[in-house]
Image: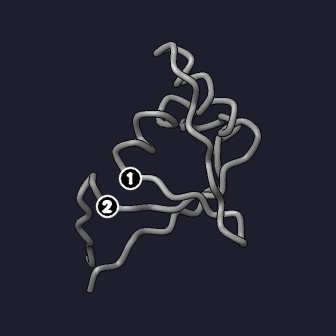
Amino acid sequence: MKTSEYSINTTVWVKLNAIGRAMWKQHHALTGKKAPDLTADDEGWTQFKLYKLMQVFGPGCFQGADLPFSVNIRFENNE
């Protein structure tokens, strides 16, 4: 079996949808702070640290859920 290791500090990219953008705002509203603006590249990919992706969007990722982003995740490759 081939495996890969990634640090939770690894940079990842996802394509957020309306649910994901709402979760981002809701997560920050709980702290009483305005959510930082999200910037997507020309293809719609938004960059996060893996730990932040899990912290903010993890509760919305379960079987049968309307996911907050597309099912593909890009991982930074530092080879």
Quadrant where the N terminus is found in the figure: bottom left
Quadrant where the C terminus is found in the figure: bottom left
Residue 74: x %, y % from top left: 50, 68
Residue 66: x %, y % from top left: 70, 37
Task: Name the residue rendered at 56%, 38% in the picture.
Answer: 36
Q: Residues within 10 Å of mark 1 (few under 14, many from 20)?
A: some
Element under label 1? strand
Q: Residues within 10 Å of mark 2 (few under 14, many from 20)?
A: some
Q: Is 47 located above or below residue 21 in the figure?
A: below
Residue type beneath disc 1 = Lys
Q: Which residue is label 1 attached to?
A: 49
Element under label 2? loop
- Picture quadrant where residue 4 is located: bottom left
- Picture quadrant where residue 29 is located: top right
Asked whether, in this view, residue 2 is left or right of residue 29, the answer is left
Mark before the other along the chain sequence, 1 or 2: 2
